[in-house]
Image (tube, helix red, strand yellow):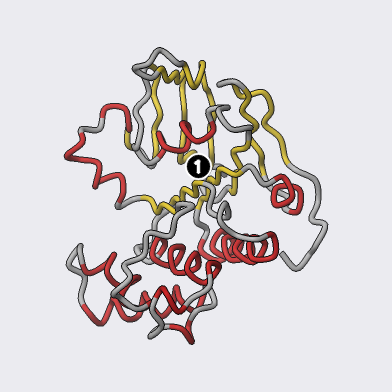
Amino acid sequence: MFVEIIRAMNVEKQYKNGVTALYNINLSINKGEFVFVIGASGSGKSTLIKMMYREEKPTSGQIIVGGINVGKLRNGKVYKLRRKIGVVFQDYKLLPKLNVYENVAFALEVIGMQKSEIRNRVIKVLKLVGLKEKVKSYPDQLSGGEQQRVVIARAIVNDPKILICDEPTGNLDPKTSLEIMKVLNNVNRKLGTTIVMATHDREIVEKMKKRVIYIDKGHIVKDYIEGTFKNESI
């Protein structure tokens, strides 16, 4: 049985400068799906992704994420949405004076979780992303790919049902990008986390048998499943 977790209904977005980024967007994403959102620069894909974590609000229409109508969410209540979802950006945004363990644990400390539970969760997710041996390392001692793994761990440590990824491989070389996709694929399969990822990297999309939403000039022009894996190790 499919359970809808994200829905956009007649969503349009017009910026204050008069530019319309999205026209009449309608889509439904089910719990446990892994969905790519692709399109050229300026197509509107980043705007759609930003609305899912309430960086932007629709001008008209509705977008429901985890049962929350993000367009009606007041600025002071955005934290309620952010507790339900994880977000991974292109820029790592790690705290430079904290080590790997502390960077990930910080996300739980701010909500007042017990130290014993924090430790259990942090070690679990660091093992999942392949960084269990790097717990005491600092961001400047890590490669770009390792830093992005820390970001993913931090985003999933609170066990969100949805993970929003905005160009997470944009700063990485092709080999490292595929390693990060393997991590995200494991998160999706092993934890059942719904993943929505904006990317311009066609190679990544073609290597994974996932749903693809293609946006062009503010319209959804294709919604399809990409072909079979070219590399079964991913």
In percent of width and height, residue 221 lies at 67, 23
Q: Residue drawn 48% across and 87% down?
A: 133
Pick whichever, 77 or 21, lies toward us.
Answer: 21
* Secondary structure of residue under mark 1: loop
Q: Is residue 117 left or right of residue 201?
A: left
Q: Residue drawn 51% across and 63% down?
A: 191
In percent of width and height, residue 207 lies at 76, 53
| Res. 103 image quadrant | bottom left
Three-letter residue code for mark 1 = Val
Q: Residue drawn 32% across and 36% down?
A: 68
Relative vertical location of residue 60 with respect to residue 156 in this rendering, above or below: above
Q: Is residue 133 left or right of residue 230?
A: left
Relative vertical location of residue 191 with respect to residue 68 in this rendering, above or below: below
| Pointer 1 local density, CA inside 10 Å: few below 14, some 14–19, many at least 20 | few
Relative vertical location of residue 166 with respect to residue 13 in this rendering, above or below: below
Pick whichever, 105 or 137, lies toward us.
Answer: 137
Quadrant where the N terminus is found in the figure: top right
Q: Is residue 171 left or right of residue 51?
A: right
| Res. 171 image quadrant | bottom right
Pick whichever, 171 or 88, lies toward us.
Answer: 171
In percent of width and height, residue 209 lies at 73, 50
Q: Label 1, on which residue?
A: 3
Find the residue positioned furthest to the top: 18
In percent of width and height, residue 231 lies at 80, 62
| Res. 69 image quadrant | top left
Quadrant where the C terminus is found in the figure: bottom right
